[in-house]
Amino acid sequence: MYAIIKTGGKQYRVSPGDVLHVEKLKGAAGSAVEFPALAVAPDGEKLRAGKSAGKVSATIMREAREKKVIVFKFKRKKQYKRTNGHRQAFTAVKIGEITAA
């Protein structure tokens, strides 16, 4: 069984037991969170899509920041160089139960 969820402007294909890094969510570690499913595919059945496809329950595992990405700006012959870094915040979520409507 799998489902397709949307959070943080991105879509993810999830199954029970998966651990995802998604955009930062409100809530402490250990708290429950629920995502509406865009589509659900129960075992041996057709894909169900739409607003009433189902729900996906998950648990927040931790909040952290990704590895640093270096941003380097450069213009040749002008002696212009700028170095900057960015670390994106994320929330690790463990997928629990997928319920189909």
Image (cartoon, grey):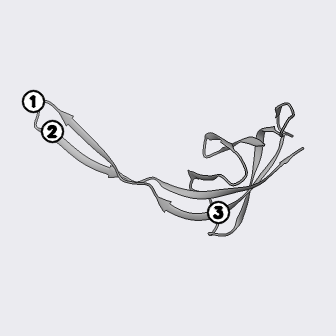
Residue appearing at x 25%, y 42% in the figure: 72
* Residue named by callout 1: 77
Neighbourhood count class around disc 2 (C-alpha, 10 Å): few under 14, some 14–19, many 20 upward: few
* Residue named by callout 3: 60
Give left or right: position of 39 versus 29: right
38 or 80, which is in the foreground?
Answer: 38
Q: Which amino acid does label 3 sit on?
A: Ile
Q: Distance between the residues labelled 3 and 1?
A: 50 Å
Q: Which amino acid does label 1 sit on?
A: Lys
Identify the residue at the far right of this view: 101
Residue appearing at x 65%, y 52% in the figure: 18
Q: What residue type is labelled 2?
A: Tyr
Labelled pair 1, 2 in contact (Cβ < 8 Å): no
Neighbourhood count class around disc 1 (C-alpha, 10 Å): few under 14, some 14–19, many 20 upward: few
| Figure label count | 3
Which quadrant is the N terminus positioned in? top right
Residue appearing at x 82%, y 32% in the figure: 47
Give left or right: position of 49 versus 66: right
Give left or right: position of 45 versus 77: right
User: Which corner quadrant of the image does residue 34 belong to?
Assistant: bottom right
User: Which corner quadrant of the image does residue 49 belong to?
Assistant: top right
Q: In this view, does 29 lie above or below 70?
A: below
Q: How far apart are marks 3 and 2 (CA)?
A: 43 Å
- Percent x, y of residue 56: 77, 51
* Residue named by callout 2: 80
